Image (cartoon, grey):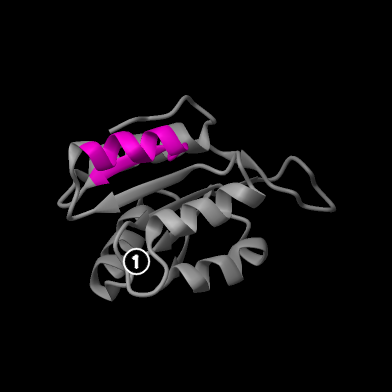
Amino acid sequence: MTAPVAKVCDHPKSPSVSCKPAVMLVDDDRDLLRLLSIRLTAAGYDVRSMTSGEEALEQLEQNNPDVIVTDLQMDGMDGMTLFDRVHASRPTLPVLVLTAHGTIPDAFSTANRGVFSYLTKPFNSRVLLSHLERAVDGGATAGT
């Protein structure tokens, strides 16, 4: 397992303080949210978990994530609506979409709209970590 890319924190007294990359997880499945949080924390990420798109938007500025990982189908606001709202205000913030109901047309559609990565559940944790590392590093779109 590779370590995540260190980022430079905006710390008023020491601008070069190294800190963990921040990931905002958004999923209405609390068990999956807990599992992903444990895995990503163990991989060196600072994880903030949200149970809805609405909550993620409310907490976006306060949490200032380096990347968002969201489920596609959720009660209330779905993952693509969340992406659209985030993208409107922060177009360079990478968003990775996870779904249990993925199709090839859905994957192309999300890529065309600017989603950084689209992964189907169940997904390989190493693949997710690789996509997260590229997103934090500012790499090109990871694709599917």
Which residue is located at x 24 percent, y 53 percent? 99
Residue extending furthest toward the right: 13
Q: Position of residue 110 (x, y in %)?
A: 37, 40
Looking at the image, residue 60 lies above or below residue 105: below
**Dot 1 lies on which element?**
loop
Q: Which x, y percent locates residue 92? A: 60, 39
Residue 22 x, y percent position in the rendering: 53, 53
Residue type for callout 1: Asp
Magenta-colored stretch includes residue 114 = yes
Secondary structure predominantly adopted by residues drawn in magenta: helix
If the image is split into quadrants, where does the C terminus sit? top left
Q: Work out whether residue 74 or residue 43 is closer to the camera in this orientation and state it.
A: 74
Residue sticking out furthest to the left = 122
Residue 61 to residue 8: above or below? below
| The residue stretch that appears in magenta | 105-119
The residue labelled by disc 1 is 27
Q: Residue at x 39, y 58 (%)?
A: 79
- Closest to the observer, 42 or 84: 84
The image quarter containing residue 104 is top left
Q: Quadrant of residue 2?
A: top left
Badge 1 crowding class, 10 Å Cα cut-off, few under 14, some 14 to 19, many 20 or more, is many
Whether residue 84 appears in magenta in the rendering, the answer is no
**In the image shown, does 105 or 48 lie closer to the viewer?**
105
Looking at the image, can residue 2 be seen?
no
Quarter holding the N terminus is top left
Task: Please say if 131 is above or below 38.
Answer: above
User: Is residue 135 in sight in this rendering?
Assistant: yes
Task: Give the percent coordinates (x, y) of residue 142.
Answer: 37, 30
- At x 84%, y 52%, the residue is 13
Where 19 falls versus 104 (above or below)? below
